[in-house]
Amino acid sequence: MNYRYLGRTGVAVSELCLGAMTFGRETSEEDSLRVLDAFEDAGGNFVDTANVYAGGESERILGRWLRSRRREDVVVATKVRWGTGSGPNDAGLSRGHVLREVEASLTRLGTEYVDLYQVHGWDPATPLEDTLGTLDGLVRDGLVRAIGVSNFSGWQLQKALDLSRAGGLASFVSLQPQYNLLTRSTEWELMEVCRAEGLAVLPWSPLKGGWLTGKYTRDMAAPPEGTRVDAAERNGWSESWTNLNDDRTWRVVETLVDVARELDRTPAQVALRWLMEREGVTAPIVGVRTLDHLSGHLGALGWRLPPEAAERLTRVSEPPLPYPYDFVRMGVESRRLEE
């Protein structure tokens, strides 16, 4: 396992982050602890969870595992935005809700601080200045070492960074976006902001809910029952069959399978490797249900994609650019010609 810095914090994190969303939900506590042990044995030191995963049980399981570890050896990330209660103030990024949730997360994790406390999504009801001020107070009080953000748009992220800078507040050090071979719109603005501002990038859903594992084929009429894509179809999630059953998806998947066969790797390992080698990416977040899943993902470590294979995947997965990004690219390319 190699290590990369978490933005400009000076904190070294493993090049894969273990996502704990399945803990206490699809994965029992006993199996979750085995997964954590195996990840640690492979050199992993970075674990991501959230206050709402499995109604808080994910944090509790991680906390029980942490008790037998030297705390400073594990970089723990969790999130706030949604809550586990059903009241009108049990969600959002108001000062009251953030303070309640960070206290609850610390209790469930059994720790005195969180290494990376992430805003899970935008809250249109709370002034951004209020949220940033609250997060700054958590950093100053030592309850949180650094703050990050997930699921923001480009303008939202840049506004937050500018407000923090102008107010002398703690700034976001990382972005957790959806990013994979089938979700490349992340590159249009978000990756540009992160590169310019020195933020770490922690992609979630690097395998697009299973689409990039090779288990789905063009000739299927529907996803197999019990799969993540089947659940997405029933629940209206972004990786549903209805949303992705199109020619672009199958061209990407088929190219991925071909490249994997040529390299004697699994499609999942190749998809992860492609993402790990993208400029600006710090650590993809891999969520697993079993030890076998983790073992497979660890096969993405210790090698590099041949340049021609990486280019094939990049080219086939390139989405058409909508306005104004098509005009932006034309401007960049014309400027290069002039130079």
Image (tube, helix red, strand yellow):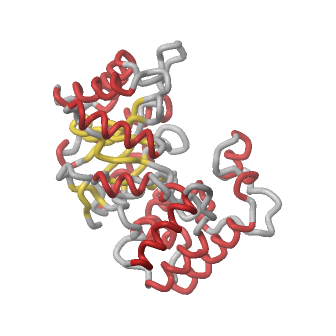
Side of 314 where 114 appears, left or right: left
Q: Which residue is at the front of the view, 114 or 156?
A: 156
Q: Quadrant of the N terminus?
A: bottom left
Q: Which residue is at the front of the view, 262 or 334?
A: 334
- Residue 63 position in % (x across, y down): 31, 36
At 24% from the left edge and 47% from the top edge, which residue is drawn? 74
- Residue 27 position in % (x across, y down): 51, 45
At 41% from the left edge and 24% from the top edge, which residue is drawn? 93
The count of marks equals: 0
Side of 58 where 174 appears, left or right: left
At 46% from the left edge and 23% from the top edge, which residue is drawn? 92
Q: Quadrant of the C terminus?
A: bottom left
Q: Which residue is at the front of the view, 283 or 109?
A: 283
- Residue 279 position in % (x across, y down): 37, 66
- Residue 151 position in % (x across, y down): 48, 42
Q: Quadrant of residue 303?
A: bottom left
Q: Quadrant of residue 280?
A: bottom left
Name of the residue lying farthest toward the right: 221
Residue 269 position (above or below residue 294): below
